[in-house]
Amino acid sequence: MNPSTATGTVAVPPLVAACTSPAALRTIPKAALAELAENIRDFLVGAVCATGGHLGPNLGVVELTIALHRVFDSPRDVLLFDIGHQAYVHKLLTGRAAGFDALRQEGGLSGYPSRLESEHDVIENSHASTALSYADGLVKAHALAERTDRAVVAVIGDGAMTGGMAWEALNNIAAAPGRPVIIVLNDNGRSYAPTTGALAAHLTRLRSPVGEPARKHNMFASLGLAYVGPVDGHDIGALEEALRRARSVGRPAIVHVVTVKGKGYAYAEEDQADRFHAVGVTDPATGRPAPALRHPRVCAPRSWTSLFAGELLALARERQDVVAVTASMLRPTGLHLMAEAFPSRVFDVGIAEQHAVASAAGLATGGYHPVVALYSAFLCRALDQALMDVALHRLPVTFVLDRAGVTGPDGPSHHGMWDVSALAIVPGMRICAPRDAARLRELLREAADVGDGPTCLRIPKDTAGEEIPALARMDGMDILHRSTGHFLDVLLVATGPTIRPALDAARVLETEEGIGSTVVDPRWLLPVNPALVHLAARHNLVITAEDNTRTGGFGSHLALACTDAGITVPVHPLGLPSAFLPHATRTSLLAQAGLDADGITKAVLAARYHLHRHTVTPQYLDQARRPQ
């Protein structure tokens, strides 16, 4: 392979450029398909290394996607990709090659299927284990509408098959022989990491050359599915034959396709740590981060994930009762360090968040303190378990939510912007957000010391930056800034990553507008600290800033607490809008939401203007004149 350069626009090979649609793909001679596959891999390595994105999963499905679009007629025949991060080849074969120079960048191609981009993207699927349910519903819709001439195909990675939803759907699909869903099981033995559990062992037996009887008596056939395979996932001819056979049986069928993750790019094929599952900007010639991003003489800021990984390992060494649980995200959430040191105390349950949380409840019932590490966006899938299995029983389970807030290039399905709102309804839930590495260390230990209910610690997809010292700690809260020589007019209550811009805004307000302010980090957001309510009462205006949606977020709960206490000070919550945010940089998205220093400054000025214009009272004037 001769990968393209990672700088500048990557040239689109002629054969790839010719694939302006699936119909155009079907005009390419069979003899040229191997060359097309090689061209696609060359292009993907260059393009994805230039922008960052999911590389390994897509290199593994090149031939499979070619075969799918040659056998089925998208969009008349429906192709569903689960998980959607294996859909880059699908994007290429449906005429979107030119957009890869801005892959996952603001205004550019999404890293997942996107209905806004193409009629060939039927669902925007980037959460695992859902495509079989979509397929079940679509084939039912076709039957009701008497559309008997079109196929429904769900391409599901073997890791996604570990999710409970996939088995709920399979239970229904297999029970209805008249609804011919075609399930393409992409078996590469990995999702984000090696596939775990009994399913992985069963698939290993099925693809063993010794297992002819096992193939005839496998779990899928036992459920009533027509089983086709295992098929070499890099042999286009064999794939086309298998797919046509599955379509012809006229009942639910599963095509077991064996592929190699990272196929054709040596660094990705040899990667046992799944570093090439998703990459940042990379030098394709070496497989290492691009030279411009490497500063060997400078100590690079550490990511929140790596900080948590180290602190959890230290905590596990201190306390034998600390165990950890994740849902197929051992390395992405930082649990790998603890797993290496204490393998018997770390449990990866596969892509099964509901089971992960309920299993953690069992561990807590048995006397342990589980730390459940998930991406924030994925916790919503297990809200019922957090509510009814953990909180109802007042169990000490700590949730550590990675990628809380906006994540950037992964787009709307991965922004962790609902967790505070969702968990706020859980009785007894305590939620914290560290502002720096020192607070992460403190808060993780404080969470682990809670023995009568659940706790949650939120960390963003970012580097932690320098420590932000406190002027004082007051009833568990940290006072970070207090204006001198000015009346303390405004209380800025910032959380996690909004604290630095809040401090910058306070300095601008003081030096350029003559407005005095206090900046406080509550550390523990919910339940609202009564001391914070009393502090709010000593100011004329409260502005809160959080990287959660404003709807039901921390700010709204502080406002309610003030109302309940009979305090009339106006509380203006700043946060993310109640909308699905597109993919863009974190900096851009936070600025658009008014969560940078400029946005917070403008919000304070606008709120003060409104307050002066509409609600100036003698009491307000007396307060404004009185030093705090």
Image (spheres, helix red, strand yellow):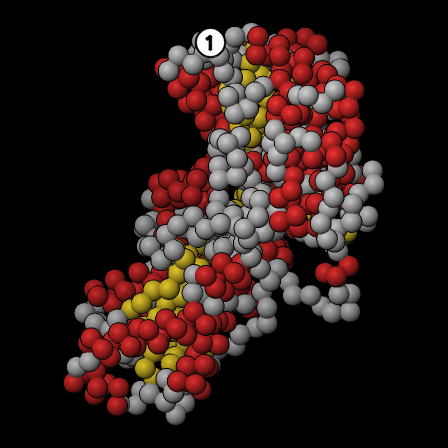
Q: Tag 1: residue type?
A: Pro
Name the image quarter holding the N terminus: top right
- Residue at image x 38%, y 55%? 577
User: Quick check: 66 above or below 376?
Assistant: above
Image coords of residue 441 (percent x, y): 55, 64
Spot the residue most to the bottom: 485
Farthest-out residue, left: 618
Tell me which residue sits at (59%, 72%) in the image: 466
123 lies left or right of 332: left
In-image side of 490 versus 463 (left or right): left
For label 1, the SS is: loop
Q: Is residue 290 visible?
A: yes
Residue 443, position as x, y percentages in the image: 49, 63
Q: Quadrant of residue 219?
A: top right
Can residue 369 be seen here? The reply is no
* Residue located 36% across and 60% down the image: 554
Where is residue 226 shown, x and y percent of the image? 57, 10
Judging depth in this view, the residue of 483 and 529 nearest the camera is 483
The one of 427 and 553 positioned closer to us in this rendering: 553
The C terminus is located in which quarter? bottom left
Image point (21%, 86%), residue name = 621
Callout 1 crowding tier (Cα within 10 Å): few <14, some 14–19, many ≥20? some
Q: Which residue is mark 1?
A: 177
From this view, report whether residue 376 is shown above or below residue 575: above
Q: 35 or 290, which is in the foreground?
A: 35
604 versus 14 height, above or below: below
Number of numbered discs visible in the structure rendering: 1
- Left or right placement of residue 209 versus residue 252 in this view: right
Q: Position of residue 230 (x, y in %)?
A: 68, 17
Viewer-nearest residue: 473 or 108:
108
